[in-house]
Every structure is written in structure tokens, then in C-alpha cells.
Image (spheres, rainbow, N blue to C red):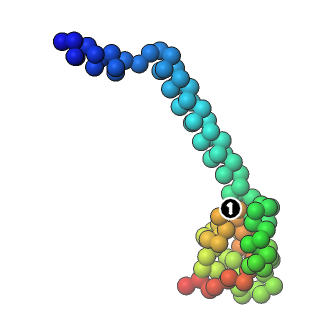
């Protein structure tokens, strides 16, 4: 009987510990929410508006308006925006590209 009481005592959680756990969970959930909101804001910006994209933009020679009418982001294999005027590109982790844009990695959509 004494052994069972010892096990039960080890499993008890004090109100303070429960409160700390609850506070920790609330803070963690708030942090996730803020990160998601921040990530969502970057996903709505154009790739040219996000500073960390600058080296890749330069390397790919991305322009918002294609100088070649028949090859633009809207008909590129890596454009994920469907028929939308702007959308995600598989080459960029953050931001949107213009469907009228162009870069050196353009390849015709199958």
C-alpha cells in the first residue's frame, strides 16, 4: 500500500506547475501565431519587395515584365500561380512573382 501511495505522490502536479505549463503553452501558441502571420505577410509581397531575395533575383535576371512576349512566368513550368496575375514560383521560398515576369530559368509549361 505504501508503494502505491509513493507512486501516486510522484504523479501529482501542483497548481503552480500546472499554471506554468499552461502559461508555457499559451506563449508557445502565441509565438506560432505570430510566426504564421509574419510568414503570411511575406507570401503576399512580391519577390522584389523582399530583401533576402535580391541575390537570387539578380542571379536569375528576374524582371516583372517579360521582354519576350511568348515566354513569361504565367506559361513557365515552375510558376505555381495557375491563371492568377501573380503567384508563387518554385524558385523562390518567399514572395510572389508577376505572371508577366521573366527570368533566365524560364521553361515552357508542358
Residue drawn at (47%, 15%) of the image: 15
Residue drawn at (22%, 16%) of the image: 3
Q: Nearer the viewer, residue 4 or 15?
A: 4
Quadrant where the image shows the C terminus: bottom right
Quadrant where the image shows the N terminus: top left
Residue 100 versus residue 32 in the image, above or below? below
Residue 95 placement (x, y as % from top left): 70, 62
Residue 66 placement (x, y as % from top left): 78, 81
Residue 39 placement (x, y as % from top left): 66, 52
Q: Nearer the viewer, residue 53 or 70?
A: 53
**Pointer 1 residue:** 94
Rendered image quadrant of residue 87: bottom right
Residue 53 versus residue 21 in the image, above or below? below
Residue drawn at (66%, 41%) of the image: 34
Q: Which structural element holds mark 1?
A: loop
> For this view, does 20 lie left or right of residue 6?
right
Q: Is residue 35 visible?
A: yes
Residue drawn at (63%, 47%) of the image: 36
> For this view, does 34 lie left or right of residue 23?
right
Circle 1 packing at 10 Å, graded few (<14), some (14-19), many (20+), is many
Residue 106 placement (x, y as % from top left): 67, 83
Amino acid at each position: 500500500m505504501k508503494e502505491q501511495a509513493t507512486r501516486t505522490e510522484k504523479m501529482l502536479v501542483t497548481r503552480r506547475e500546472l499554471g506554468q505549463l499552461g502559461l508555457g503553452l499559451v506563449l508557445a501558441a502565441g509565438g506560432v501565431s505570430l510566426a504564421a502571420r509574419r510568414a503570411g505577410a511575406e507570401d503576399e509581397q512580391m519577390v522584389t519587395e523582399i530583401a533576402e531575395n535580391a541575390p537570387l533575383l539578380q542571379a536569375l535576371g528576374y524582371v516583372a515584365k517579360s521582354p519576350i512576349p511568348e515566354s513569361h512566368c504565367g506559361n513557365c513550368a515552375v510558376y505555381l500561380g495557375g491563371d492568377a496575375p501573380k503567384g508563387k514560383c518554385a524558385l523562390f521560398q518567399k514572395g510572389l512573382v508577376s505572371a508577366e515576369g521573366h527570368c533566365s530559368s524560364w521553361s515552357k509549361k508542358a
